Image (cartoon, rainbow, N blue to C red):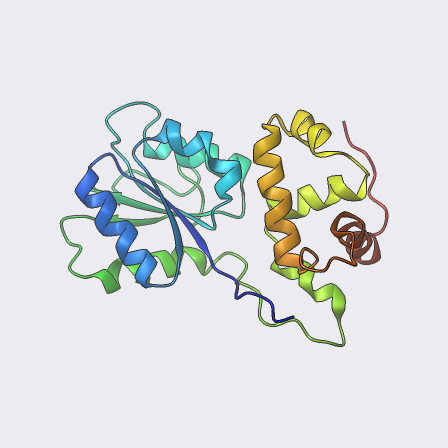
Amino acid sequence: MKEAAWVRRALVVEDQPLMRVLVADALRHAGFEVHPRPSAASALADLDEIDPDVLVTDIDLGARPNGMEMAMIVHARAPHCATVFLTNYPRAGIAPGEGVPVGSVFLDKVSLESVEDLVAAVESALADKPLPPGPTRDDNPDAVLDRLTRTQLDVLRCIALGWSNAEIARRRGSSVRSVEKMVTRTFDALGVNHSPELNPRVAAAQLYVRRFGMPAEIG
């Protein structure tokens, strides 16, 4: 069965509806799966389910946490996620690692002239992160693991430990529904979720153990 193409996910956080729609539409046309949110609170509530590759956010969101505070929370929970700040504020005085994730890209709303500039900024932020995986080689079946994000790899490690979705949710401090979505997305990325003859949980665990060995339980 032909595997679905890997699609990068963008979390767009902007309190101004028009700007939020414009940014979301631009990224969709650039091939991203886009999840727009009006506030940091709503974005963080859905972070595990979205599992974004890049966060595109305004700094002033009209409420706390602001964009910079949210970006640091996202970085702590999803280190693989790149960050692009859309802002009217100058970057002067902001040093990498001081209140913003290292590698963050700043884009001045006032000087933004085209959709291409926005997409280029997002691609620049992603350049320092793992690239989306290419097609899996038939002679290396374990290569499908390279398509997983760090969050998905952590979920796969939990599956290899034999944990149920409920146990994974308890350990991660997430809802069972959120974990179910992460597990399904992980199975889809591995290509083990489409055969009635295959137990996806067992097949996924075998892939993990074959590549990394039996995981040790932590915590």
| Front position in the image: 26 or 191 | 191
Asked if residue 38 lies left or right of residue 166, the reply is left
As drawn, 167 above or below 2? above
Res. 89 in view: no
Please give left or right for residue 180 compared with residue 72 in the image.
right
Q: Seen in the image, is 219 located left or right of residue 213?
A: left
Where does the C terminus fall, quadrant-wise? top right
> In which quadrant is the N terminus drawn?
bottom right
Q: Position of residue 130 (x, y in %)?
A: 55, 59
Q: Which residue is drawn at 78% across and 57% down?
A: 198
Q: Residue 62 in the image: state x and y as whole percent.
A: 23, 26
Query: Does residue 36 appear in the picture of this structure?
Result: yes
| Horizontal relation, residue 147 to residue 19: left or right | right
Residue 174 percent across, percent down from the top left: 59, 28
**Image quadrant where residue 11 sits:** top left
Residue under the image location 25 percent in, 41 percent down? 92
**Quadrant location of residue 145?**
bottom right
The residue positioned 62% from the left and 47% from the top of the image is 184
Q: Is residue 92 above or below residue 199?
A: above
